[in-house]
Structures are given as structure tokens and as C-alpha cells.
Image (tube, rainbow, N blue to C red):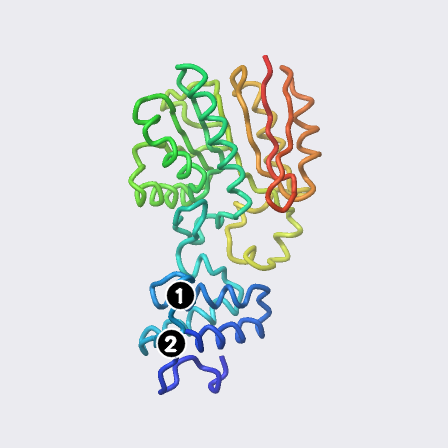
Amino acid sequence: MQPAERLAPEADLHAGVLVARVAARLADAGSATARLDAELLVGHAFGRDRAWLHAHPDVALDRDSRAELEGWVERRAAGEPVAYIRGYKEWFGTRVATDPRALIPRPETELLAESAIAEIAARLVRDDRIVLARDVATGGGAVALALAIRFRTAISLGRVRLVASDVSADALELASENLAAHRVESLATLILGDLLDGGDHLNEPAMLDVVTANLPYVTSAEVDLGAGSHAFEPRLALDGGTDGLDLVRRLIAQLPDRLAPGGVAMLEVGAGQANAVGEMAAALRPPIAVTLLPDLSGIERVVRIARLD
């Protein structure tokens, strides 16, 4: 900020004034979500949420907190995601810790979690078999966390077995911290492995009932541009190769050997990728059925691959 625009002059600044000034600063820096960013950062400085902030526009922030807020605003003005600045993201009704070890969970990934929950729940009421679930490329563990919380009792009773894997040890460390923060660390097994590989030492069953995967699906060219959060998030979690589908192809090729009869794999994909991914899956043997699931924006976001035999 220019000296005349600093957030911490001698006079106290109230919450409403701070939000307006921060929003103006971020708009000048090119943020497309300047007002939202401002409310999140100012609310974080108060240790409160946006609803509280709206209800208390005249509450003044202390000088030390205002100075800390200035640093956050400059980081956001430089493009750093708010989730990294605050250290968490509200996602699927849960606070998920976030930092540069892993991708920030996106709102559209909630569809993947919802779909997995529906698949596992249907199996639990259908028969008494143990449901074997694997979350591939778990990153910071958001989807695994959602499943562990939802099926806390079923996992504890041995009805569901949940494994989450990633090729990044750093990401798995963050996933472990997220599970522990919600006291479900004993309900999911974390393994270091590439796609569906790994886990042999844990005697993981070869055939899985439910597979979820939010693989890197951004093209290398887009990652190279470093636009927005892509400049701050780990490339390993973003780069899907020339067309964004390198890892998706590899995972689909593994499914005939790892997906149990009647099993389902659900893959999150980028805008415009669903048809191509569906065609890849449709060529698999044994026979499978492909369903494309749209997100709230109408974008076909999850490819559901069900083994029929």
C-alpha cells in the first residue's frame, strides 16, 4: 500500500471502514473478488466470520491486529490465495487446514464428496459386506475427511475401510493434520503411493468398491501461465500434462484390475473434459457404465464409472 492508504493510522478504524478500504485496495490490485476477500481477511483479523462482521461494522480493531491485517492484504494483492493467508478453507461444512503443501479444496469438489457418500451409504444398506473405499490423490485430505466424518460409526464398526493415498509426502502430512484436527485420524489409513499403487504392506484388498479421485487436470500450458492461485499451489497437484488428462488416463487403465464387480470409480475433471474421459472409460473391459454428473454451475464435473459384471 502507498503510505496514504495504510490501514493503521493513529485514529481507530472500524470494521466497516476496514472492509471498504481493503476492498478498494484489492480491486486496484486486480482481484475479481475484492469485496469477498476483504470481508474474509478483516473477519479473520477479528477472529470472527463474515456474518459477525456484517452485524458489527462499528467495532474497532486493535493496532497490532491492524498491522497484521496490512500484511495479509499485501499478500492477497500479490495474488496469494486467501485460504493460504488464513490457513484454512471452509469446505463441505468443515474447516480444512490449507497451506502450500497441497491444493486448496474447491467448491466443485464437494460434488465428488457427495457422490462418494451416496455410493458408500447405498452399499451399507444393501448388504452386510465391508465397503472398501480408496481416495486417490487425496492432497490435503478434504474428501477423505468428509468420508471419515460421515461414516465415523460405520468405519469404527468395521463396515467401511477407508484408505487415502497421494504421491506427495508433504500433502499426506497435511492430510494427517486435518484428520487429527477433527479427531478421525484413526478412521482413515494414509499411504504414499502413485494412483492405485502402494498399500501392499497394509494388506489392502486388491479389489475396491468405491474409488474417488481429484487428479491434476490443468494443462501444462495453463500452469505455466501461473495465473491466480496456480502461482502459489504445488505444480504436482495441478499439472495434468498437455491436455490435462495424463494422470486420468493412467488411473482409468488401472481400474479393470482394481475395481471390484459392481464397484464404482468417480473422477473429478475440468470443464469440457468429461466427454473425453467418459469415452476412455467406455472402452474398458469388463463392461462398464459411464454417467456424467454436473456441478451447481451445470458443468459436467464428475465422471462416474461403474463396473457392471
Q: Secondary structure at mark 2?
A: loop
Mark number for residue 58?
2
Q: The residue under label 1 is which amino acid type?
A: Gly
The residue under label 2 is which amino acid type? Answer: Asp
Q: Earlier in the sequence, mark 2 or mark 1?
A: 1
Q: Which residue is mark 1?
A: 43
Mark 2 neighbour class, 10 Å CA radius: few under 14, some 14 to 19, many 20 or more: few
Which residue is at 56% across, 64% downward? 33
Residue 152 tag number:
none
Give the percent coordinates (x, y) of residue 252.
60, 27
| x then y, percent, for residue 105 | 49, 47
Direction from residue 293 to residue 189 in the image, left or right:
left
Q: Is 120 placed above or below 56 here?
A: above
Say what secondary structure mark 1 lies in: helix
Which of these two is toward me, 197 or 255?
A: 255
Q: In the rendered image, which quarter contains the C terminus?
A: top right
Picture mark count: 2
Residue 154 to residue 190: above or below = above
Left or right side of 34 for 290: right
The residue lying toward the viewer, choosing from 50 and 246, is 50
Picture coordinates of residue 87, whole percent (x, y): 39, 56
Q: CA distance from mark 2 to mark 1?
A: 13 Å
